[in-house]
Image (cartoon, rainbow, N blue to C red):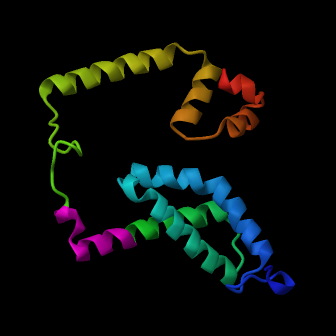
């Protein structure tokens, strides 16, 4: 059954739902990466859902001009709320250290040395790339941009960025 007069059961309009879906498609992956970088990878999907729930509420109250800033502000607030909740619930202290979760894997001098050696090799390899290829690689891997966005930014085709 379709909602009457463009309104859904929760009271939102189908236009708002379409806008929310577009924002999710544009920012969903970036939000997951944002949460993973901040140590909340296991809860990333739940946190993204919380961001879009808050975004839906905020968008219903007023118009949003700079959506990217607004979404990541919400994301940071969600992280803070989750952290505070976890402190109250004692979650950081409940996790048992086991070999399965990698917490007991120590950073031995050998492992640190190998890591630095691999990093130095990586930096040399990146430095040896042609400038445009290096730029595309860094934008994709470290800025987490899509091939299409990089192609548009650099003024080349998507297949050129992929190569």
x, y percent for residue 157: 78, 28
Q: Quadrant of the N terminus?
A: bottom right
x, y percent for residue 161: 68, 26
Residue at image position (58%, 34%) is 140
Most common SS among magenta residues:
helix
Number of marks in the image?
0
x, y percent for residue 146: 64, 39
Residue at image position (35%, 23%) is 119
Question: Closer to the camera, 110 or 52?
Answer: 52
- In the orientation shown, which residue stands out farthest toward the front? 1
Question: Quarter-wise, where is residue 26 in the image?
Answer: bottom right
- In the orientation shown, which residue stands out farthest toward the right? 5
Question: Quarter-wise, where is residue 136 in the image?
Answer: top right
Question: Quarter-wise, where is residue 108 in the image?
Answer: top left
Q: Is residue 88 magenta?
A: yes
On screen, residue 162 versus residue 143, left or right, reads right
Residue at image position (42%, 21%) is 123
State which region is magenta: 81-94
Question: Closer to the camera, 70 or 111?
Answer: 111
On screen, residue 112 versus residue 68, left or right, reads left
Question: Closer to the camera, 121 or 48?
Answer: 48
Question: Closer to the camera, 99 or 135?
Answer: 99
Q: Quadrant of the C terminus?
A: top right
Q: Is residue 147 magenta?
A: no
Vertical placement of residue 112 versus 142, above or below = above
x, y percent for residue 54: 56, 75
Vertical placement of residue 158 versus 121, above or below = below
Residue at image position (18%, 64%) is 94
Vertical placement of residue 137 versus 76, above or below = above
């Amino acid at each position: 059954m379709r909602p009457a007069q463009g309104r859904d059961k929760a009271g939102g309009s189908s236009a708002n739902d379409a806008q929310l879906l577009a924002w999710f498609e544009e920012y969903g992956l970036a939000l997951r990466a944002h949460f993973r970088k901040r140590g909340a990878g296991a809860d990333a999907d739940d946190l993204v859902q919380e961001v879009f729930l808050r975004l839906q509420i905020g968008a219903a109250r007023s118009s949003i001009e700079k959506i990217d800033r607004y979404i990541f502000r919400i994301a940071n607030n969600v992280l803070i709320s989750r952290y505070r909740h976890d402190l109250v619930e004692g979650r950081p202290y409940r996790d048992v250290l086991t070999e399965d979760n990698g917490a007991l894997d120590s950073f031995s001098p050998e492992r640190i040395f190998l890591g630095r050696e691999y990093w130095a090799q990586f930096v040399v390899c990146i430095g040896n790339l042609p400038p445009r290829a290096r730029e595309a690689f860094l934008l994709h891997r470290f800025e987490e941009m899509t091939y299409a966005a990089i192609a548009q930014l650099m003024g080349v085709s998507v297949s050129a960025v992929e190569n």
